[in-house]
Image (cartoon, grey):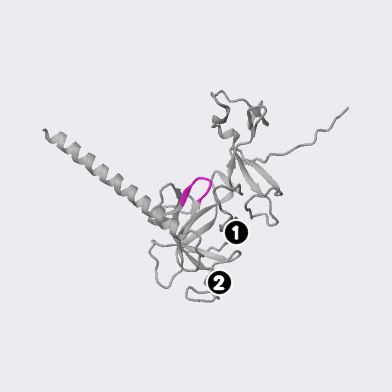
């Protein structure tokens, strides 16, 4: 057996071990996640933030500067997450402290700071934390860059969905659905026609109509509540809005005025 073949076999074994270790780590992370589901978040808790729409983790890149504010660390969304994806919840106001047993629970409406767990902090100075820059993005002047900087930024906790309402078999705010017309065997779709966004029923060319997978037929459910930022589990009496996933436009009925 040639030395080249031996080298290739050793590399394959090494790659297999790395992939196996990564898979075991993902399984362990999932088990740890399942253990923490339903627990009350307290000040001093270390957690990860998963962006629901992209299914990626908010992550601080310690080795790369931010795109706009070069004095700050870059913040991105990472599919797998790493040590930069862990944040410690700290109170924004001094009246609450990490060791305060009376007010250690984080409640809706609290103002907090998100401090990256694995970023080295300098004693006596302002901690590095998730920060909103005053500088705008080059491609969108109305949007501000989010980075990591030793400058205090307060984030307010707003309740979107209660834990007990987050059930897999119940329709709730944030779920993505297709609206299927049973009689016509067609999906409600939004697409551009002659430069105008149009809503219509589209025929799928697949063998079975229910196999359609176009993102143009995907709608995000919003369950209307008194608070505009809050959602919940749907009931038969609930009022809904449907937001087109590809364009972020809402399904609406417009009154047609007869000019005759």
Residue name at image x 67 percent, y 54 percent? 228
- Mark whose residue sits in front, 2 or 1: 1
Say which residue label 2 marks.
93
Could you tell me which secondary element the residue under label 2 belongs to? loop
| Contact flag, marks 2 and 1 (Cβ < 8 Å) | no
Residue name at image x 19 percent, y 38 percent? 9
Membership of 33 in magenta stretch: no
Image quarter of residue 227: bottom right
Could you tell me which secondary element the residue under label 1 belongs to? loop
User: Which tag, 2 or 1, sits closer to the chain's start?
Assistant: 2
Say which residue label 1 marks.
159
Placement of the C terminus among the 4 image quadrants: top right
**Depth check, front residue: 158 or 31:** 31
Q: Which mark is residue 58?
A: none
Residue name at image x 38 percent, y 56 percent? 83
x and y percent of residue 251 in the render? 68, 39
x and y percent of residue 254 in the render? 76, 37
Q: Does 171 sit left or right of 128 as displayed?
A: right
């Amino acid at each position: 057996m040639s030395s080249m073949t031996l080298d290739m076999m050793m590399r394959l074994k090494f790659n297999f071990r790395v992939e196996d270790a990564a898979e075991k780590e993902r399984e362990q992370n999932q088990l740890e996640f399942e253990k923490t589901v339903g627990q009350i978040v307290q000040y001093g808790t270390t957690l990860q933030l998963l962006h629901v729409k992209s299914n990626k983790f908010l992550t601080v890149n310690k080795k790369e500067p931010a795109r706009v504010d070069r004095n700050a660390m870059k913040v991105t969304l990472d599919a797998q997450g790493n040590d930069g994806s862990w944040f410690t919840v700290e109170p924004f106001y001094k009246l609450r402290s990490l060791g305060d047993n009376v007010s250690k629970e984080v409640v809706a409406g609290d103002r907090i700071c998100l401090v990256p767990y694995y970023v080295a902090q300098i004693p006596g100075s302002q901690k590095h934390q998730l920060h909103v820059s005053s500088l705008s993005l080059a491609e969108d002047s109305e949007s501000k860059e989010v980075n990591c900087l030793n400058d205090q930024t307060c984030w307010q906790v707003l309740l979107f969905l209660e834990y007990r309402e987050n059930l897999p078999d119940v329709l709730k705010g944030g779920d993505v659905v297709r609206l299927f017309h049973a009689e016509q065997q067609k999906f409600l779709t939004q697409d551009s026609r002659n430069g105008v966004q149009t809503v219509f029923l589209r025929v799928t060319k697949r063998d079975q109509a229910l196999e359609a997978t176009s993102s143009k037929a995907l709608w995000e459910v919003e369950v209307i509540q008194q608070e505009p930022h809050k959602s919940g589990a749907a009931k038969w009496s609930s009022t809904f809005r449907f937001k087109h996933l590809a364009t972020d436009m809402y399904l609406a009925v417009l009154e047609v005025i007869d000019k005759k």
